[in-house]
Amino acid sequence: MTSVSRKARRRERAAAVGFAVACIISAVPAAAETALKDAIAGGMPIIDLRLRSELVGQANKPKNALATTLRARLGYQTGQYFGFSALADFDFVQHLGPKHYFDSKGGAPGALYPTIPDPDMVALNRLQLSYAVRLSDNAPGMGPDLRVTAGRQRLIFGDQRFVGNVGWRQHEQTFDSVSLVDTSLPATTLTYAYVTRVNRVFGPDSPMGRFDSHSHLFDAAYSGLMPRLRLEGYALLLDLRQSPALSTATFGLRGDGSFDLGSGFAGILNGAYAHQKDYAKNPASFSLSYYLGEAGVGFKGATALAGYEVLEGNGSVGFSTPLATLHIFQGWADVFLNTPANGIRDFYVKTGYGFSASPVFGKVAATLVYHDFKAERLSVYYGSEWDAQIEGTVDANLSAGVKYAAFHGSAPFAAKSVSWLYVAYRY
């Protein structure tokens, strides 16, 4: 073989390699573009509609409030693009008929009508970018075990007693935040969130619509100790600029367990304790505790549970939970959204039953709750409350329900009754 032919072959090989490299380089952007299109096209729309009528009677208001409102939450969530995904949705809330209620920013005068905090609005609900990656081969499943999310997002910790989205209101509570959720350790979920703003249910145009924040939220949950037992620990460092009196450091523990009692019966035992003190620019100085105990039994769709929840007060300030989904605690009439200065003791009994009501409803859930409220610090009776709800689900998307709350108060807590009728569709 001559040197000329060898040189020619080397040139041919070099040209072939160069052509292959060029094809690969040109294919990468094309592949990335295809993957991006697939991620967008492979996403899913967000459609969450709810029509609700709410009637409120309150002893210290001369007129009853009536609000019929329609909420349309519309948006889109993309599929995965090299671990990244995006989500955006908006809330459209509009009252129907006369506006005979105070909505926290306007409408009928608050001195005459009770408040129903569902103002008309067109508001950004969520706008977030997430990145998911797998860190450990020891974690259960084959999906990602670390998710980082930045932007306006929904945060829910545990039972929502301290951090939740207040989903009962037409515009939910969201958080401008960077959050990390790590499930790489067996039976363990670790969550951290740095919150720069709390977007409250009152909407962006209300004077109570937001808390500017420099808050750090930590939560750790573990379920590997024994079957059907969940342990949770949390540290919540709240620095809320619009309401420095609510800036607190709270450290707590919670345990939720259910146990097989045989013959179809299951036992339920839940307990929690937290300690709270002033933090950041809070002008007060205090040290308060929170504790909870619950015990119940379940049998073939029926449950009965008794609980005792205490939020301490020192006469000047009460244990606070400003980021909680408060509606599901201490009565649906929402009388105790702020803990009284002398604290509160809530003894309650809750019963529930789920059954089928075909062909109209695939499942019906009925709930009845009784609360007895007293001061924690003094021997003062606050009042009692009955709550009742029946909700039926037609299918995975459509549901309807009726709900009622009646608070019988002792001064300074006025008697209050609230009734709701609603239908919801979620895709």
Image (tube, rainbow, N blue to C red):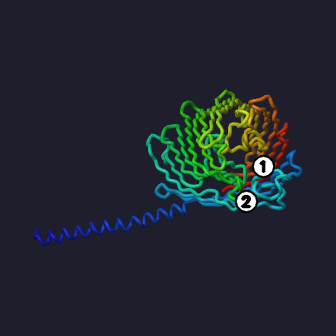
Residue at label 1?
401
Q: Residue at x 54, y 44 (%)?
A: 192
* x then y, percent, for residue 191: 54, 43
Q: Name the residue under label 2.
A: 93
**Is 8 above or below relative to 358?**
below
Where residue 211 appears, as percent x and y from the top left, is: 64, 51
Which quadrant: the C terminus?
Answer: bottom right
Instruction: Report the amino acid beneath label 2.
Output: Val
Tell which residue pokes out farthest to the right in this image: 62
Query: What's the distance in space between the residues labelled 1 and 2, CA to CA?
Result: 20 Å
> Residue 115, position in %: x, y?
79, 51
Amino acid type, mark 1: Gly
- Asked whether the viewer can see residue 359, the reply is no
**Where residue 169 sits in the image (x, y, percent)?**
72, 51
Lower position in the chain sequence, tag 1 or tag 2: 2
Q: In this view, does 19 lie to the left or right of 253?
A: left
Q: Residues within 10 Å of mark 1 (few under 14, many from 20)?
A: some
Measuring 59% from the left and 55% from the top, which residue is drawn there? 152
- In the image, is residue 348 above or below residue 149? above
